[in-house]
Image (cartoon, helix red, strand yellow):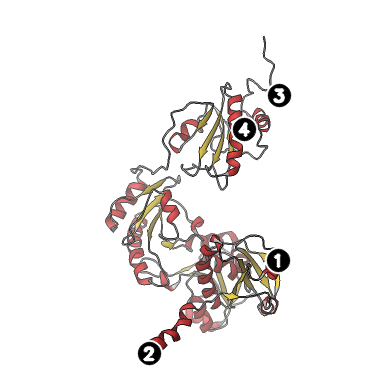
Amino acid sequence: MNTIICLVALLPLAIASDVLEFTDSNFAEKAASHDLMLVEFYAPWCGHCKRLAPEYERAATQLASNDPPVPLVKVDCTAEKDVCSKYGVSGYPTLKIFRNGELSEDYNGPREAAGIVKHMQSRAGPSSKELTSVEETEKVLSKKEYVVIGFFKSADSDLAKTYQKVADSMSSDMRFAHTTDEAVRQKYGYEDTIVLFQPEHLKSKFEESRVEYKGDDVIHKIKSFITDNSLGLCAHRTPDNADKFKTPLVVAYFDVDYVKNTKGTNYWRNRVMKVGKKLLDEGKTVYFAISSLKDFSHELGEFGIEDPSAEKPVVAARDASDKKYTMSGEFSMDSLEQFIRDLLDGKLEPFLKSEPIPTDDGPLKTVVAKNFDEIVNNEDKDVLIEFYAPWCGHCKSLEPKYKELAEKLEKEPEITIAKMDATANDVSKPYDVTGFPTIYFAPKGSKSNPKRYSGEREVDGFIKYLAKEATNELKGFDRSGKAKKTEL
């Protein structure tokens, strides 16, 4: 009986949540009591809402201890219809930022925990927090994030004013603080300077945990210093910061967990760092990161890595030209070092996600990754290429028109009409495909700078565009797109 009582007593702890839940009846009153809050309008059946839920919960827990705290709220739109209607919610999840009970702006930031935290921290309080005591400084430095602190004798100094401008422009990406307190300056031993502090959980013997700025009092130089040093020797790469990494980049993927298993996470990270330190000391240019298998399962698929082992890291890399490589065999420091040396020496075969090269030779050319250079980067021809997805409704509607276009231009010797399934093939840079269909025109002599097509998606519209943009005038159409008369 005592066991049952204990379990019941502990049950509320198991289901406690830091996400507040508001209703039609209390939304206005409760919202007005918070200077700043983020509200998720959701539906219990929504798949996107279910995927967001654990990230939103983790962000809520972190922001609850922020200074100042930033509450995260949710509203069930299937039950609380008045509030959702008032704020024009038409899809789920919809996130909005409120200040003092009033709608401030739509939330368009990241939808994973670290990104939500950073985005909301940048909206809370000043861009740089003033530190007035040693205790307050220690509290800021106890967070699991990089912090930049300006140590100044006077807040009116030129360096302090420049620092504030840097903080204003970078506060959504980095945590900033500053102090003129003498006790804080003496405690940390800095005077009229800027210092980047590494979070406690990332500290190691392979690099300094503090980096002091030694450059001029110039905004862009200070910003570059922060950007260049805020990832360290081997950063924790997340969906929120993935776009900030330079290449060549080597990433070790495993069960990264700095909440429940910091020691185990750093066991593998330290092995990557030991190899990285050795190569960097030799003057090699290469960057390192660790990433969660769970957070980057889709990316691993892009490298051809299926069902990776959770016991040891799997390693993948991108070189300076963004080509992809995977390390074969079991992870060890020796195998990692050899993989990186071979990568930098150009000895590895890149991984290319590609369908087989098609055998058909119709008017509309089917491009795959393996023949992309041969067809699209052919310097003898202008190329119009459509990147599509087989499931895309707009692509299906365009297909007969695009095929008709290819047939009408079949006898044009200097132009190719092509298509490529961007879900089954790697898309080479500089082509940027974020939606479907995406269409580019790649003229002869300018293959490195293709033009995104944004005109009519009708046959006549395509022809007018190509007649005007073609490197040489088309045989069957003048520059205005009118068909030329055929001599009898």
Q: Secondary structure at mark 1?
A: helix
Instruction: Report which residue position mark 2 lands on.
Output: 1
Q: Secondary structure at mark 4?
A: helix
Instruction: Report which residue position mark 1 lands on.
Output: 85
Does residue 403 sit above or below 230 in this rendering? above
Point out residue 338 in the picture as x, y percentages from the top left corner. Answer: 29, 51
Point out residue 455 in the picture as x, y percentages from the top left corner. Answer: 67, 38
Residue 460 visible somewhere in the drawing = yes
Q: Secondary structure at mark 2?
A: loop
Q: Earlier in the sequence, mark 1 or mark 2?
A: 2
Give the residue type at disc 2. Answer: Met
Instruction: Report which residue position mark 3 lands on.
Output: 482
Mark 4 vs mark 2, foreground winner is: 2
Residue 158 visible somewhere in the drawing = no
Give the residue type at disc 3. Answer: Lys
Q: Earlier in the sequence, mark 4 or mark 2?
A: 2
Most foreground residue, 453 or 306? 306
Mark 3 vs mark 1, foreground winner is: 1
Identify the residue shown where x is 37% and y is 56%.
280
| CB under 8 Å between discs 3 and 1 | no
Most foreground residue, 448 or 456? 456
Instruction: Report which residue position mark 4 lands on.
Output: 401
